[in-house]
Image (cartoon, helix red, strand yellow):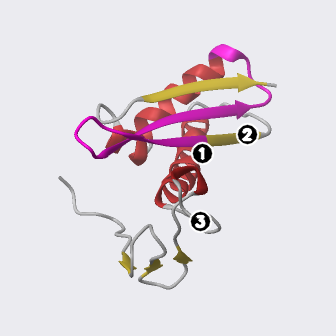
Amino acid sequence: MADPIYTAVATSTGDGRAGGHTVSSDGLLDVTLAIPAEMGGPGGATNPEQLFAAGWASCFHSALKSAAAARKITFTDSAVIAEVGLQPTDGGGFSLSAALHIELGGVDQATADSLVEAAHAICPYSNATRGNIPVTLDATVD
C-alpha cells in the first residue's frame, strides 16, 4: 500500500459521544458531542454519525465531479445527501448503514447512474465501507 498523501488527526476527550469533545490537530474542527435525542440523549450537539455523513457526502460529491470531468460530462446543480444509520446488533453492539442520495441536473438518468457508480468506485469512504455495511445509492435528475 502506498504512503498516505494526507493524514487527518482528531482527538476525543471527556465522555466520547456522551458530551465529550473532539478537536482536529489543526484546530479547524472543534466540536462538543452529544447523544441524539432519538437515542435517549440530550441532543443539541453533533454526533459521530453526523460527522461521518458530512465527510462521506462531501467526499462522494468530489468523486462525482472528478468522474464527470474525466468523462467530459457537465452537469448543473448537484447535491449528495448521506444518511448514516446506527442500529443495534444481536451481540449488544452497534453497526452502521448508509444511503447516498445523489441529485444531478442537466443529465439523463442513465448518465447520472453511470456517474454515481464511477464515484462509488473512486470515493475513499465508499471503498472503506464496501462489503462492511449495507449501502444504497440512488440518483435523481432534474
Q: Seen from this angle, which residue lies furthest top? A: 110
Amino acid under label 3? Pro
List the residue tagged with mark 1: 61
Q: Which residues are magenta?
A: 82-110
| Residue 78: numbered disc | 2
Residue depicted at 58% across the width and 52% down the height: 58
Whether 50 is drawn above or below 63: the answer is below
Instruction: Examine the residues drawn in magenta and state their main secondary structure.
Output: strand
User: Which residue occupies 60% across, 39% down?
Assistant: 69
- What residue sits 54% from the left and 61% below the top? 41
Mark linked to residue 34: none
Circle 3 residue: 42
Residue 7: % across, % down: 34, 69
Examine the rendered structure and indicate whether residue 52 appears above or below residue 139: below
Q: Is residue 33 above or below residue 122?
A: below
Marks 1/2 in contact by CB < 8 Å: the verdict is yes
